[in-house]
Image (cartoon, rainbow, N blue to C red):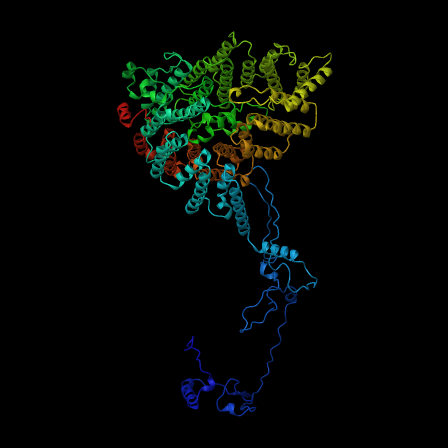
Amino acid sequence: MSLFPAYEISAPSQSSDVDIGESRNDAIWLKNSSFQPDIISGSREISVSSESSDGEFSGIPGEKITAVVDVEEIPHDSPPLKKHKKSKKHRSNKNTKGKMKYEPVVDNVYYDDRIRDRGNFKVDTLCSRARPLYTVFYKTLGFIPFTHKKKSPLPRYFAISSDTPQKSSKVSSKKLKDATEQSLDIVRTPEQIKEDETKSRIKEFNEQLSEDPNDIDLWVQYINFEDRDQDFQISAHNTKAELMKYQRKLAITEKALENNPDSPVLLKYKLNFLNELSPADQYSSQLELLISKDPGNLILWQALITATRSSIALCTVPKVLALYSKFFAGLHLWSRSSSQFYDSNLLQMLHHCLTFLRQAGLWEQMWEALRMLLTLNLGITKDSKNFKGSIDEKKLIGMEEVILTSQLPLNQLWLRVELLRENCHWTTVRREELELIGDSHRFISPEDVSEFVHPLLSIQSNFRLSIYALLALKVPLLPTRHSILEELGMDQCNWGIDSAESLLPILFPCVGEVAGHQERICLLKGVIEGGITSGPQYLKFHPAQEGFVDFIRDAFKIIAEKLILEEKNQIYVWWLRFERSLVGVQKCQEIRNEKSIKKLKGILKEFLKREENRNNLDFYREYAIIEREMGKWENCLSILETAVESKGNLILGIKNVEEQRSILSLYRTLLETLLDTRTWDVNNKIRMMKIFAQMSPGSSQAEQIIATEQYLKDFCEEFFNDPDVFDEGLDKYFQPNFYCDAVMCYVYFMYITGKDLEGIHTLFERCIERSRKNRWLEEIFREGELIFKQMVCEMQGRRIDELKSSLDIVLKTFPDNFYMLSVSSAIESELPNWCVRTSTSNKRLWTAVSLCLSGRARLNSELCQKDDVAKNAALNKLLHFHKRLFKISEIRCCPLIWRLYMLLLREQNLCEKKGEEVYHESVASCPWARCIYIDAAEIAPQLLTQIQDVIKEKDLRMHVTPEELDILRG
């Protein structure tokens, strides 16, 4: 049967005469009497033979039967058409058909494409007359012009024509192999090349690990190498891809633990992967089983507490506190061979417990536990009058009545009363005061927190305890460096960062603040005003602000007085830097509270008049910096010069090492004050040369300057050759380093005298190479190098490329250094929108926070305020960046990231669109953080009842219940 019925299989030659006759009879219907065709005279010849016919006519070969018809030609007299003269001139070549290179042959449909046809890549365009006039230009939405890069030509498989004659010379097998591999590389896609590289890299890992299975660093590299899915254009957040990735990682980790069962690093990796692969309840059950086998394992306990705290289904305050109590009950199982190791682990867990109580809103319980810890280990008296809140309860009740009679919406009434009580309540009250207060949660007895109070083994751990105690009161480390965060275990405590107080070291790094002041202020613009705080706070004005500041001052004083002299001085230096940051915050908010400034001056003068503090040069240095922060530059310089003159100016004439260190630190502060870019003037150079001359004896200023240069150079050489210079650590964290100050003074001398910058960079490289044995010291020298480069870039208007390249290298080693992050954020905030990073190369929390701040600074910049298109682009970039961050488990658990996102929604009026969605996502990630619920009530007021129910369900602190609010309103 034929495939198409219109065509029969049999040839027409097989038809008989009968068929022909029938066909003729069937054609009778074509005749119509109403239509008579014209009969054309003439003769024509019609062939009736066919090559394919094999009927009776085929039996006579070579003979054709034809019919002759006469045809008469009729002449046409119409004149020929005249073509337009321009038609030939403007004839388009696009309508002409090109010559076919291949004849279509039915028997040979497929052929080898060996000829390059450039027409396949040609796009026909309109002619110049039909094309409108337009110009092409590029306008960026950012701060730096955008330049296009030329596209590199793509290699084609027909790059070499097969028709070109080939030489018949012999080719060696090696060259032939190389040529073959090169041709294969051209044909292969980039994904295939990456896949081959990955296979070879995995093969190398397997070979190296088979030779040395105890190399933990190599195992960690192999585990991290399994993040390669992003190199093959697989969605980084595809559920199946994520599961496959974590399954591979878990298999490698378990293999590594078989060879290294006692490795805490590998155990942490395994627990993280189990957490990603298992539901919360199943993961908790696995951890409980592991703890039953090893009840003294700190890592397992931390993982179990984290799993319970982070699960919205499992998290309640009593359940988490029960786990902490159970953990502290097993302290007798810990090894006490190393008292320092025991104390550091104990203090780290105590700090986690206090942080959880604070974030849950249980300030009274947290402070009572902290007070008992200080009483037990530092000997602080129990009935100290200094540890009492100064807020008047009757005054507080009066302010509540003003709020309740304001006729605000119900959600605003609840929020304002809740925040007012939250800001004013942080210490426990006596039992007899409960009748006036009416809140039973305000009274905490020592028995309620006794299970969280434990003694330390060594008196040397008291300084570490003091640092943790002040951190629990939301006092930031000044300065904040990567080394101390690692030492205190805070680099792995992302969930403990929830308020804007932790961002103060970005605004005030407290290390060589010579340049970049305005950029740092722009980074925190709107953050402090946005109220990203929790509990009592000292950043924004409220009725209890001054009382809480006094409370922190008393805490500094009482803790410092119980330490040895060196540790005591460091705590006081920290306190003076904290006071300076408070002055700077008021200055940034353009609020000058004369009463508080006058009170601070009185406190500082009284502090410096004490007999034990009168000769301490470190205190005078910090006092001078506070005066500079108030805007009194001449007072600052006068205080520094007076302090230097009190010791005779000459550094070499001082035999006491501590005084020599303090004098050199004063000189460095004096020089950096004169180099400050806000007040830099050419006349400052003359003043600096006089200061350098004062450092050395001599008959003339020129002789003194030469002597100063020589002994500063000698100090640098001493640092390069002295083996006993690596004594930097936690016990000297708040002290200036002598050799670092000497190097910085020498660098400033070389810069002022016009020395080559290459020599200065070489000096820094030598210092950094020398200090690699001590990470604390190396980080300080890295800071010094960036301080100088930032100053030069701002003074001379140099490009920031060199500074940015150096910064990227340093941040790989010290990613949590707040000064470096502030410089990086300032540079990032000035980049155009098209080259802004929308993802983080690492999973470090503070890197992500700094990028969020730089995005906010870009959004608030003058360019975005004037250009709506640029503003929308910057806003979309920042929103997308937040979305990317929430996909990273290490960052998603940080309440501060969510609060910054909610603040952005409030500022840009996006609450109605995204508020409810963000509430559910944030609560699922941070169910223990009370501040998340308070912020969610502002962006999703329609969910207020649901938010209050969840707070009750989790047993978080609620200062005013809906029932109590109804009573107060009535």
Question: In which quadrant of the rendered view does residue 784 lie?
Answer: top right
Q: Position of residue 521 (x, y in %)?
A: 52, 27
Task: Tell me if 797 is positioned left or right of 276 in this view.
Answer: right
Q: Position of residue 918 (x, y in %)?
A: 39, 37
Q: Looking at the rendering, which quadrant does residue 799 occupy?
A: top right
Q: Of residues 182 and 80, which is closer to you in this image?
A: 182
Which residue is rendered at x = 70% and y = 19% of the image?
710
User: Is residue 44 shown above or below 669?
Assistant: below
Q: Please, which residue is most extreme toward the top here?
A: 611
Q: Position of residue 145 (x, y in %)?
A: 60, 40
Residue positioned 64% across, 63% down in the render:
162
**Image position of 232 with respect to 916: above or below:** below
Number of marks drawn: 0
Residue nearest the viewer, comparing 327 with 92? 327
Q: Is residue 426 visible?
A: no
Percent position of residue 705, x then y: 70, 17
In the rendered image, the vertical position of residue 48 relative to residue 409, given as above or below: below
